Image (spheres, helix red, strand yellow):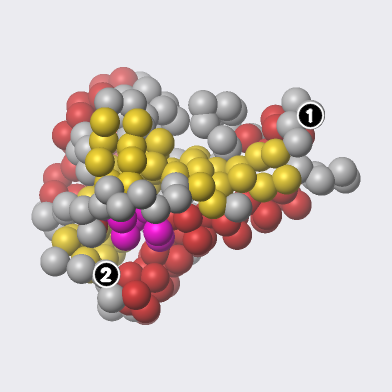
Amino acid sequence: MKNIVILISGRGSNMEAIVKACAAEGWPARIAAVISNRPEAGGLAFAQSHGIATAVVDHKPFGKGDAARAAFDAELQRVIDGFAPDLVVLAGFMRILTPGFTGHYAGRMLNIHPSLLPAFTGLHTHQRAIEAGCRVAGATVHFVTAELDHGPIVAQAVVPVLDGDDESALAARVLSHEHRMYPSAVRWFVEGRLVIDGARVRHRDGESQMFG
């Protein structure tokens, strides 16, 4: 039985999708904890209502700067490791993580980013895709590395960019695919179906890693 720890900063809709899929599909895993850097994160109440342990590591008291970031990450790592995670899942966790932290969880930390990486790393991905005239957009699940929004790609979902789309309309269309793709990717990991081969990730059984 694998332990999954999920990190959130807000509502945690992808966290909700993962929690529900884990229970409904009988994964060989349990959601050991949901942890947030924001005490007011709405997803904490959802986790608690499902009997999942929660914790808060508030980043604000640590201040700003490289030393503060490293101190926060060290405390976050201590709390996470208290739940003996086999996998750490970033689900809308709005922090840039230090190389030491990402290295500690190398090969066992996943993130979802709302673009077709390597395009549009960082913020405001949907608006940037519209402004660039993209005909498709999407989301990417990837293993986390020290470089922001990079790392071996596990799965991608592709959606059309429609005439008249604004940022919110495109975001909603992408999010509906995220809620199917991210639980699938997490399940693949806990079932031992993912093989990292350098910069590429393949599904051991050849299952499609494309959604849309």
Q: Position of residue 43 (x, y in %)?
A: 44, 64
Residue at left offset 27%, top offset 26%: 198
Residue 70 figure quarter: top left
Q: Is residue 51 above or below residue 187?
A: below
The quarter of the image holding the N terminus is: bottom left
Magenta extent: 183-189
In-front residue for pair 11/129:
129
Q: Which mark is residue 133?
A: 1
**Numbered circles on residues, count:** 2
Q: Position of residue 174 (x, y in %)?
A: 63, 51
Task: Report the predominant secondary structure element of the magenta stretch.
Answer: helix
Amino acid type, mark 2:
Trp
Q: CA distance from mark 1 to mark 2?
A: 40 Å
Res. 56 in view: no
178 with respect to 124 (left or right)? left
Q: Is residue 66 above or below residue 58?
A: above
- The 10 Å Cα crowd at callout 2, few under 14, some 14 to 19, many 20 or more, is some
Residue at left offset 74%, top offset 32%: 134
Q: Is residue 63 above or below residue 21?
A: above
The residue identified by callout 2 is: 27
Q: Position of residue 115 (x, y in %)?
A: 57, 37
18 with respect to 174 (left or right)? left
Residue 22 figure quarter: bottom left
Residue at left offset 23%, top offset 59%: 191
